[in-house]
Amino acid sequence: MKVGGLGDVAGSLPPAIKKHGYDIRVVLPLYYHIKQEYIHSMEEIAQFYIHLGWRSQYVGVFRLEHEDTVFYFIDSDYYFKRENIYGEFDDGERYAFFSKAVTILPKVINFKPDIIHTNDWHTALVNLYVKDFRIGDSYYDDIKTVFTIHNIKYQGIYDAWMLSDILGLSFERYFNDDGIKFYNKINYMKAGIVYCDKLTTVSKTYAGEIKYQFFGENLEGIIRKEEHKLTGIVNGIDYDVYNPQNDRHIEYNYDCNNLDNKYKNKRVIQELYGLDVRDDFPLLAMVTRIAPIKGIDLLERIFNELLVCDIQFVVLGTGDKGYENFFKYYEYYRPNKVAARIYFSEEEAHKIYAGADMLLMPSMAEPCGISQLIALRYGTIPIVRETGGLKDTVIPYNKFTQEGNGFSFKNYNAHELLFTIKNAINIYRNDKKAWKALISNAMGSKNDWEASSLEYIDLYNRLHEVRYV
């Protein structure tokens, strides 16, 4: 049920940790849209009820072992048989239900965890429920919690008066100024930050950025207060899923010793999208959610000037209607140079990563970023703004030492972006040897889950050694 970067993490990090001998299990809602092939392979293993205010709500538990990892699914037609994953009128109640069910689940299935690791606002309340259940139930005494912020912009903020009874928590104990009440609202992410034992975010740079107002989204004060438990661990990608040597979505498989096939994939993209088939024009791409935070406004300011250059441009994604129309206009205006695919296709995304020469990510903020990691894997050179995980993973090219795996610019400035793109185009066109070295550096970058999973394991082990007195 991938709808963003968290889906990649939930699918890739647990198997990477399991490889090191740890028993790690994943809990998800049994969403209505999960493919039937998985539904049919699930086994119902438990049923129980939880109280949300005056309601007693049914919880079904299904189990599926997939790629050597155990997954549990929390079943509730009332909450999860919906057309949308997020964006329903009662999301606050839906994910309070899920968080409470997750907290009770280990007792029901007789699996005692040392650590419960939660992600973003949807499961942030687990950290609070563990603390609350510990009062009067010794089962929870030695369970520790880790909470990861994938994007601090999305916090799960709801009217306090609507949810106070639903949550079943004491306002006197938890809903003070340092807890989860936020003016007259309840802030789920704030609950996760305050009540977790360890707090992580998805890159070291982003862990520093969210302490300050520009990035902190009104939570910078509480982040600074809790920074003693904050760690930044950069995300990885699944090297089995993203592998140009055996990717079934691309026509020509390749590695850094066979780049002719990469250029054949470029021609596939040009033909697929009706662009002129030319090897001498660099193909720039964006595979992205089309949103202001992704730096589309910078591109909008320089796009005419950029198209004067001998380049081609492809965008794949959906989002803000104004920006969607901006890309559609230029596709209509310059169909031989611009292709706007305003939808998302996993198959076409792989084709673009394999066939493009450069990937643009001029983001205003980017907690970690997945696209630049995939691009590096496929030898597509990222051009990024130095923020969050983009700064941590893209090393600027140095023409004197031939070091680096991409291009970057510091300030959120349209012409700084344009200058950086033109610099990349110049090297692509006039220094083939340097460009080939860049591709080699990019494909040699190590961005799988191996190093990051070991950092998480170290964090878990250090936390597990802590004993409450």
Image (cartoon, rainbow, N blue to C red):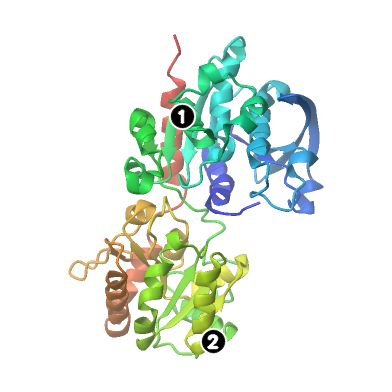
Q: In the image, is residue 203 above or below residue 434?
A: above
How far across and down, in percent of the image, does residue 438 sit? Answer: 32, 70
Q: Amino acid at mark 1?
A: Tyr
Q: In the image, is residue 166 above or below residue 324?
A: above
Query: Is the Cβ of the residue at disc 2 closer than 8 Å to that at disc 1?
Result: no
Location of mark 2 (residue):
332
Q: SS of the residue at dot 2?
A: helix
The answer to whether 226 appears left or right of 346 in the picture is left
Label whose residue precedes the other's in the sequence (2 or 1): 2
Q: In the image, is residue 43 above or below residue 357?
A: above
Identify the residue at horizontal 67%, vertical 50% (top origin): 85
Location of mark 1 (residue):
460
Q: In the image, is residue 369 above or below residue 213?
A: below
How far across and down, in percent of the image, does residue 210 sit? Answer: 36, 43
Q: Amino acid at mark 2?
A: Tyr
**Total residue callouts:** 2
Quarter of the rendering containing residue 284? bottom left
Number of residues whose C-alpha sits closer than 10 Å to that of mark 2, classed few (under 14), some (14–19) or many (20 or more): few
Q: Is residue 316 visible?
A: no
Quarter of the rendering containing residue 340? bottom right
Q: Is residue 241 visible?
A: yes
Instruction: Report the front residue among 79 and 433.
Output: 79
Q: SS of the residue at dot 1?
A: helix
Quarter of the rendering containing residue 128? top right
The answer to whether 282 appears left or right of 254 in the picture is left
How far across and down, in percent of the image, does residue 95 sit? Answer: 64, 37
